Image: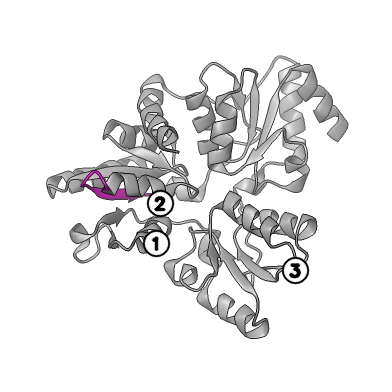
Amino acid sequence: MVNKVKELLKKHNITLAAHYYQKDEIFELADLTGDSLELAKKTKALKNPLIFCGVSFMGESAKILNPDIDVYMPKLASCSMARMAEEGKVEENIKLLKEKNIDFIPITYINSSAKVKAIVGENGGLTCTSSNAKKIVSWALNQGKKVFFLPDKNLGRNVASMMGVNSSIIGEKDWEKADIICYDGHCSVHQLFMPEHVEFFKNRYPDIKIVVHPECSPEVVKLADFVGSTSQILKYVKEHPNEPMAIGTEFNFVNRMKKEINPNIFILSSTKPECPSMNETTLKELYDLLVAIDEGRAYNVVNVDENVKENALKALKRMMELS
């Protein structure tokens, strides 16, 4: 099946992109790999068709940034965090901020639907990733405005802590006073990591480094030795190839680094932190899609409504210009 996949990719001049959280069987076949920001930049320059192995918002972003190419997904997997940011709820929150006469810039994490990106773009806002969130938020605050950060409350609060500014979740007591006002969403995988997991590893291995993603809770992030995006964690591990470390992020990514870079890596969890959405895409589904394309019956073609595309592109372009 692997050879047939390679043959069909070559035959139709298709680029295969895969996020770091994908299964090894997919990741090892990919032409382009990376986290959300890396893949957004890499796919933006493509001239040929693209198959994106990730979750739906990633395929949408690729299509918005590069509307002239065909974008397919073997599985239209839906990120649970992105689903938390329902368009109606986001619009209600923005309406509330305006009713409170709060001068703000909305910033949506790239882990959001095209429709939510469009709402943010239409309201003068922009997107960010975990790699550039601090830079984007800093830019917004320097405009003399507050930030409405969505959908991940943990990333928003952790960025606020890094910058030494106040944050609150919309609806909490005195939330209007915060510099960064967060939507009440989270990542189901990064919520699994707890302070007691950090304490367990610190007690058992006194010299161990705790490495976590900024989607983890502020309580976990405060105890970490290094906090970074997926690509930043990979860079950190490569720079410390023998150092014992417990890593709090998605299982496939951590396990791959353990096998390929540093055997002294542990998973910072008592359960397997595997993203169910990212793991929906299988080799068989990639193969089936390629066969369908070959037979002229392609499916899971990513399309974005023109009005949505126009405003979502504003939000994405503003981020790309600052990144």
Find out whether the residues at labels 3 and 2 contact each other: C-beta distance under 8 Å. Answer: no
Disc 3 marks a residue whose amino acid type is Asn
| Front-lying residue, 16 or 292 | 16
Q: Which residues are magenta?
A: 142-150
> Dot 1 lies on which element?
helix
Relative height, residue 313 to residue 208 (above, below): above
Find out whether the residues at labels 1 and 3 contact each other: C-beta distance under 8 Å. Answer: no
Q: Is residue 136 left or right of residue 244?
A: left
Where does the C terminus fall, quadrant-wise? Answer: top left
Cα–Cα span, label 1 and label 3: 28 Å
Location of residue 218 by image quarter = bottom left
> Dot 2 lies on which element?
helix
| Front-lying residue, 225 or 296 | 225
Q: Is residue 62 left or right of residue 85?
A: right
Q: Residue at x 52, y 73 (%)?
A: 194
> Is 143 inside the magenta-drawn segment?
yes
The residue that label 3 is drawn on is 264
Q: Position of residue 170 (x, y in %)?
A: 26, 57
Find out whether the residues at labels 2 and 1 contact each other: C-beta distance under 8 Å. Answer: yes
Q: Which mark is residue 134?
A: 2
Q: Residues within 10 Å of mark 1 (few under 14, many from 20)?
A: few
Relative height, residue 162 to residue 92 (above, below): below
Location of residue 249 by image quarter = bottom right
> Dot 3 lies on which element?
loop
Q: Which mark is residue 77?
A: none
Residue closest to the far bottom: 203
The residue that label 1 is drawn on is 162
Q: Position of residue 148 (x, y in %)?
A: 29, 49
